[in-house]
Amino acid sequence: MRKYSHNRSERIADQIQKDVVAILRFKVKDPRIEWITINDVEVTEDNSVAKIYWTVLNESKRPDVEKALEMAKGFIRSELSKGFKTYTIPQLKFFYDESLARGSKILNILNEVKKDFSDETKN
């Protein structure tokens, strides 16, 4: 039973991600939400909360996008309810996804170490 529940949560998370992307692109008219990327959605085991992880192309726009997402949260949830056949729609919580920035920073450090190592072996 637990495996079914886990798979169901994953399916719900995948559907929420697809639907939120479409809602943001086609239905939310706030220009602050342009160039947003929804990277991942995690749904709690009881399907009561959906954690939506996002990034934005221009980092300086992050505070404005955060405000716009908070303002649009109720509308997005309402739109989600129109396409879902579940009894309840999870509460939406938006989180800025730091993983891409961290990954890029780590990659840069590794490239520096590789370059330094390469320079040392040449001498």
Image: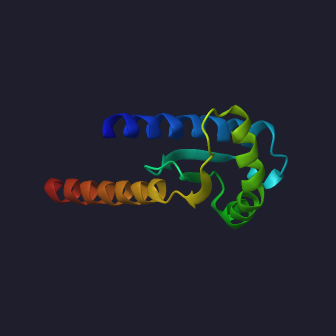
Q: Residue at x 17, y 53 (%)?
A: 122
37 in relation to 115, above or below: above
Q: Nearer the viewer, residue 84 or 107?
A: 84
* Residue 8 horizontal side relative to residue 30, left or right: left
- Residue at the far bottom in the pictured view: 63
Q: What colour-coding does the image apply?
A: rainbow
Tally the marks.
Answer: 0
- Is 60 placed left or right of 97 in the picture? right
Please name whichever residue, 84 or 118, is drawn nearer the observer in this view of the structure. 84
Q: Report if residue 34 is visible in the image.
A: no
Q: Quadrant of residue 32?
A: bottom right
Q: Residue 96: horizontal and vertical position, in percent? A: 56, 60
As drawn, which residue projects farthest toward the right?
Answer: 29
Residue at left offset 77%, top offset 60%: 71
- Residue 121 seen in this snapshot: yes
Q: Position of residue 120 (x, y in %)?
A: 17, 60
Judging depth in this view, the residue of 83 and 102 nearest the camera is 83
Residue 61 found in image quarter: bottom right
Instruction: Name the quarter where the C terminus is drawn.
Output: bottom left
Choose between 116 and 53: the one closer to the eye: 53
| Percent position of residue 13, x then y | 52, 41
Is 87 displayed left or right of 122 in the figure? right
Residue at the spot x=48%, y=58% of the render?
Answer: 101
Q: Left or right: 50 with respect to 3?
A: right
Reply above or below: 71 against 45: below
Could you tell me which quadrant the N terminus lies in? top left
State which quadrant residue 91 falls in. Answer: bottom right
